Image: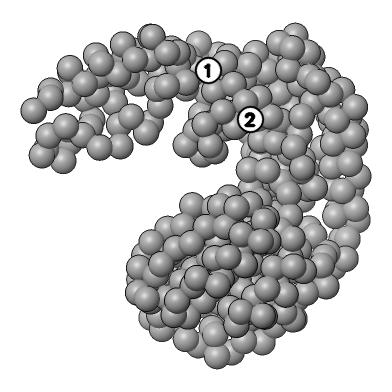
Amino acid sequence: MESPKKKVKELSATAAAHGFDDFDHSNFYSGSSDDAFCMLDPMDEWWGTRAYGAGYYQFGLPMQTAPLPTVDIRETLGNEVLKNLVNFSSYNYLGLSYRPEVIEAAVEATRKYGLGASGSPVLSGTMELHEELAEKLAKFKRKETALLFSTGYSVNLGVISGLMRPGDTVITDQYSHASVVDGIILSKARVSFFRHNKIDDLEKKLKRATGKKLVVVEGVYSMDGDLPVLPEIVDLCKRYDARIMIDEAHSAFIFGENGRGVAEHFGLEDEIDIHMGTFSKSLGGIGGFVAGSFKLTNYLRAFARSRVFSCALPPGVTAGISKALDIAIDEPELRKRLWENVHFAQNKLREAGVDIGDSESQVIPVMIRDDKHIFSYAEQLIHEGVYLNPVRFPAVGKHRSRFRISISAGHTNEQLERGCDILINVMQRHGLCR
Ligand SMILES: Cc1ncc(COP(=O)(O)O)c(C=O)c1O
């Protein structure tokens, strides 16, 4: 049996010979012995001696401020605090996480109800606050009911595995989020991926599907910022008697005339069977929901195990989300400002020859396609005044590495201009503009 040390030496040699792009977390997925810890030493050795020094430390840099339009962070390699960086890395699309009214609502509910819900939503964890938020959401989404979950991840896990069984087929876009994929794995249904937004391929997969059929798409694809070709997808689902679920994690509360999401944007709200969204992005908190018919949520109340066997949302978060939802509804000017900011940033980057793919949203991929150097570019950007996240394999395919930037309604013109200028400068310096 190969020893872990030998394995890491081999991997290091591979990395040295072929460059850093051949060497990442996936090398440590399985180990070389029967000890459940056999991957730990090689990973640790790689992390400490190679990855950290090569810039992997740029993931999860501790912030010293709220996720505001500008942030202070601690860069952990040099242990240096970098101040006033333009924040292009937050999901806080409407800037609601730091709104005083939202904070006040969360503080007040925490004072009244304490820290946690102290129970599953199906047992003792449900408070009036949860009921009120669920009702408000259902009304907002124009659906019969909504069911709250403690994360967006657990919505996808619970809904997909709650409905689908071995012998059934879940068909999803190849770029669907890990939570969709994990929900399918948990359901033990057959999984079928169709090529991103390729309608012919979806039809091929629908023809081959067995058992009950569920198609899952995203409102905004989280790494590319583009939208699903929803009218064609809905049409195909009808023709092949498949149910359709939309994950509006990145589109809920900002897309559509009233902020009801991409389903509203396309005028297809009534054609979608299952509407899913998160509170962790545009509403600035944590948690998620599914909205649909009474019958759907009644069934999921019993069969969505990620909800049944997990604690309900904390009261402070629930009250904060409720207030954030009120603001999102009452202040449409926030969405207007967001879209002005998005168009400004997209136009500026495209005009400078930066490849931002097919982004149609506040999620903008800045394509680098160089798995080896992306961390050193990220390091330069952080030091020059922009905080953004490098994304590479396995989060995206090999040689599809990019910075995923996100724009907020909270960014001022000056901040947007400054952030884009710094980004364009670094891209030009490295010959990365077209
Ligand atoms: C498309 C998509 N679905 C679901 C989730 C999970 O949501 P949460 O982070 O709220 O658990 C994410 C998170 O980024 C996402 O991008």
Q: Nearer the viewer, residue 181 or 132?
A: 181
Image coordinates of residue 143 in percent, x first then y, are 69, 82
Q: Which image quarter holds the C terminus? A: top right
Q: Position of residue 87 (x, y in %)?
A: 71, 32
Q: Residue at x 40, y 22 (%)?
A: 23
Amino acid type indicated by mark 1: Lys
Rendered position, 41 above or below 256: above
Q: Nearer the viewer, residue 215 or 56?
A: 215
* Residue 331 visible in the current orientation: yes
Question: Which part of the image, by quadrant, shows the N terminus?
Answer: top left
Q: Residue at x 24, y 14 (%)?
A: 9
Q: Residues within 10 Å of mark 1 (few under 14, many from 20)?
A: some
The label shown at residue 243 is: none
Kind of residue at badge 2: Arg
Q: Quadrant of residue 368?
A: top right
User: What is the CA distance from the residue labelled 2 to the residue labelled 1?
Assistant: 11 Å
Q: Which residue is mark 1?
A: 372
Indicate the position of residue 212 as horizontal and vertical percent values.
47, 80
Mark positioned earlier in the residue sequence (2 or 1): 1
The correct choice, above or below, for 44 with respect to 227 in the image is: above
User: Which quarter of the figure has residue 190?
Assistant: bottom left
Q: In what element is the residue under mark 2?
A: strand
Which of 332 and 142 lies nearest the eye of the viewer?
A: 142
In the shown orientation, is residue 385 left or right of residue 124? Answer: right
Identity of the residue drawn at 21% across and 21% down: 7
Q: Secondary structure at mark 1?
A: loop
Residue picked out by circle 2: 402
State if disc 1 and disc 2 touch (CB < 8 Å): no
Q: Is residue 11 left or right of residue 134?
A: left
Percent across and percent down for residue 151 are: 51, 60
Residue 311, picture quadrant: bottom left
Residue 406 as seen in the image, left or right of residue 314: right
